[in-house]
Image: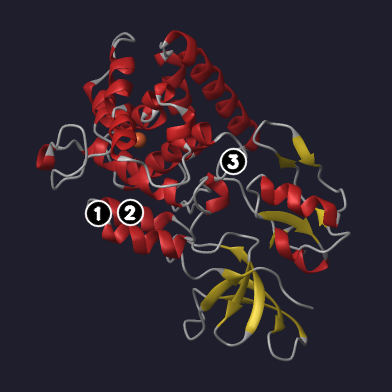
Amino acid sequence: MMRLINVNAIKEGAVIARDIISYEGGILLTRSSKFKDAFRQKLLERNIYEVYIEDEISKGIAPQDIINPKIRRQISQDIKTEFEKLKNTLEINIACISEITTTLFEELSKKDIVCDVMDLKMNDDYTYQHCIGVAILTTIVCNKMSIRKDHSHKIVMGALMHDIGKIIIPKNVLNKPEKLTQEEYELLKTHAEIGYRIVEKNGFISPITKLAVLCHHEREDSSGYPLGKGEELHIGAKIVGACDVFHALMSNRPYRQALSVKEVIAIAQMEKINVPIRQTIESILAFYPVGCNVLLSNGDMGIVEKNFAQDVTRPLVKVICNMHTHKRKEYKLNLQQQLNIHVIEKISDIPL
Ligand SMILES: [Fe+2]
């Protein structure tokens, strides 16, 4: 039973509902521990802006993981091991990548899947977080678009490895908060081709996987790099490229905080992403994650309890109080049915 609260709004003594893990894998705060003001700065310094707390009003709110957490930890560990090896040997174990892909399809086969930003966030090094996040989105999109099973598998393998070429790009270029110089940008762009070379020299691998790695920065109007394939661009490269854009915008980066789903969708609409793929991604991303506090158009404030695939902007909300009177309320509002009311915005906390 928990809700998401902005780190700046947590009060001293609030009970932490989930372990807070640092990028290095250590536990910063354990579940059930009490929050102290001194922790705030430490969390913010680590780019942690929201945490789950447990309190009286969050009763009945239980965010569901789209992937079993134990399996997810295993995937994360396997990817980490593979990428670490890759740094030294420039070789990648394709069998392991294929196995992870099979697991993702097993875990994400459910129809009507709704994915929220918390499903894609892992407190992990961005490289691992990003490749797994892009692979999760790619798996769901392939399922939704009814791509042939054998093709989907190859595309998701490409998603898992799409950025492996970054392994040889200097960290100061990858994480530079300021705009890259032309030279730095040219260097960054080489990661697509380097990734392709690494994948290619590792045994038999499908051209679909290789193309997804090589062409994930290409767009169907021939913009992007490195080949400018245009209309010939393979559907796999288009899907991985689109999921890459969405996931990157939804993540915290050294140069900016993660954007909200609403903002991400607005930006993605200006990108040259294939329209059916973009709309498929938009249809699976919940605007308001389960557990977040929201303000409704009738002036009530509440906590998101459940999201629905039919319309990802209209969740079931547990109403807590009214914003003007602060009078305590207790009822559930299913916005799939109450079409005269909508969510105005996500808010950092519910003042009681
Ligand atoms: Fe990339």
Residue 129 in the image, given as x and y percentages of width and height: 52, 36
Discs 1, 3 touching: Cβ within 8 Å: no
Q: Residue furthest left?
A: 231
Q: Residue at x 30, y 41 (%)?
A: 241
**Is 348 situated above or below 99?**
below
Q: Amino acid at mark 2?
A: Thr
Give the CA separation, mark 1 to mark 3.
28 Å
- For residue 122, the mark is 3
Q: Residue at x 53, y 76 (%)?
A: 343
**Is 260 situated above or below 39?**
below
Residue 351 in the image, given as x and y percentages of width and height: 75, 77
| Quadrant of the drawing holding the N terminus | bottom right
Discs 1, 2 touching: Cβ within 8 Å: yes
Looking at the image, tell me whether mark 3 or mark 2 is earlier in sequence order: 3
Q: Amino acid at mark 1?
A: Pro
Which sits in the foreground, 191 or 280?
Answer: 191
**Is 31 situated above or below 236?**
below
- Whether residue 280 sits left or right of residue 105 in the image: it is left
- For residue 276, the mark is 1
- For residue 280, the mark is 2
Q: Which SS class for mark 2?
A: helix
